[in-house]
Image: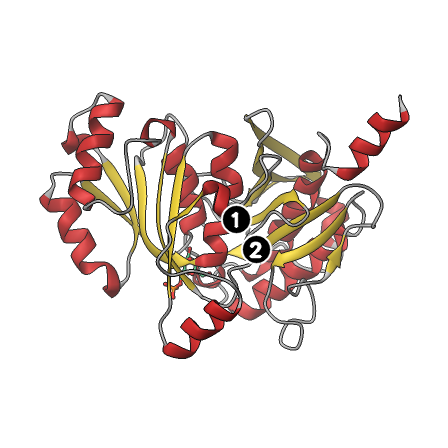
Amino acid sequence: MASSEHAELFLHPDRNLAMELVRATEAAAIRAVPFIGRGDKNAADKAAVDAMRKFLGTVNFDGVVVIGEGEKDEAPMLYNGEHVGNGRGPACDIAVDPIDGTSLTAAGRQNAISMIAVSDRGSMLDASSVFYMDKIVAGPEAVGVVDIRKPIGENLRALAKAKGKPVDEMQIAVLDRPRHAQLIDDIRAAGAGTRLMLDGDVAGGINAARTGTRIDMCVGIGGSPEGVASACAIKALGGLIQGRLVPLTDEERQKGLDAGLRFDHVYEANDLVSSDNTYFVATGVTDGGLVDGVRRQGPVIRTESIVLRGRSGTVRRVIAEHVAEKWLGDFEFGSVNG
Ligand code: VTB
């Protein structure tokens, strides 16, 4: 290999990275299993964080956590700014959510995932000073057709037309929150159906952008970190994502302004993640519309993951069978069956 090629390989994440990172989301999902339906979301999160960090340490890359478990003082691991990976290899930004849906996991509900998003160093928006982002996510047909500045009814009709289906067949994912009462009314008044989510708008957005799913669009106010992580996936899928930051207090607004964030701005995919070299990996913790949850099948523990790579647009579904015995030492897998 020519030395410039060699240098290039180490400057940017290469093709193997996502396939290696899937081991970290698999490990986090497996370790979260004993906590499914046990009512303790912090314990579930801690188990997943520990496992993810351990596996990340074995991967050849030099990652900086842009979106993690929070500030260093409150988060002992995977805090914003922490270096992860073994330090050898491409310099990356990384967004981690060892469990998106800790409450879902603790309650034993569907749709909890473990996820990692990666892009070239310096390319992810650090929106951590403003918690909420109003988002709209849809598939490739929506690009140039749907716009977050327009009323939802107009967007629905435009997307239905672009997809060649009647509006009454459109299904829109929205987080089930009181703040979305008007939005939900407007979607239904326009003739479409809602798919209300308890949590997990990253998975909702990916399902909206992929072909062959039941969701056509994902809208509403969710976490801004989730918006940036979703953008890595949506870029790989060629879909549409737009976001507007929603400060709740004057203090948060000021913190956002100090961090260089804007409130009069529609953040497009490229504003959320400026690189096209993105990766997104998610493993199911509990069963969901995106991926199946972890399940025990006799001597194996089965995981299902989705692996997206921006440069090629490839979507991989990775089913892994882990030797249960190797994982069972530290905890009782109990009656886990998905
Ligand atoms: C969403 C959802 C997440 O945070 O982003 C949400 O996708 C936003 O906050 O799973 P609220 O719960 O306050 O609405 C989560 O629920 C948790 O990170």
| Badge 1: residue crowd in 10 Å (few <14, some 14–19, many ≥20) | many
Can residue 269 be seen here? The reply is yes
Q: Give whichever of discs 1 and 2 has the lower sequence position.
A: 2
Above or below: residue 98 compared with residue 269: below
The image position of residue 287, as x and y in percent, is: 46, 44
185 left or right of 65? left
| Badge 2: residue crowd in 10 Å (few <14, some 14–19, many ≥20) | many
Ligand 1 within 8 angstroms of badge 1 C-beta: no
Above or below: residue 284 compared with residue 43: above
Tell me the CA gap for discs 1 and 2.
9 Å
- Snapshot quadrant of residue 180: bottom left
Write the residue at 67% across / 36% down: 18
Which of these two is toward me, 276 or 192? Answer: 276
As drawn, the label of residue 229 is 1
Marks 1 and 2 in Cβ contact (< 8 Å): yes
Write the residue at 79% across / 52% down: 57
* Colour mode of the rendering: secondary structure
Write the residue at 71% across / 29% down: 15
Can residue 112 be seen here? The reply is no
Secondary structure category for the residue under label 2: strand
Secondary structure category for the residue under label 1: helix
What residue did someone put label 2 on? Answer: 97
Q: Amino acid at mark 1?
A: Ala
Count of picture labels: 2
93 left or right of 219? right
Which of these two is toward me, 216 or 150? Answer: 150
131 left or right of 58? left
The image position of residue 215, as x and y in percent, is: 32, 36
Write the residue at 17% across / 33% down: 157
Ligand 1 within 8 angstroms of badge 2 C-beta: yes
Above or below: residue 295 compared with residue 131: above
Q: Quadrant of ligand 1?
A: bottom left
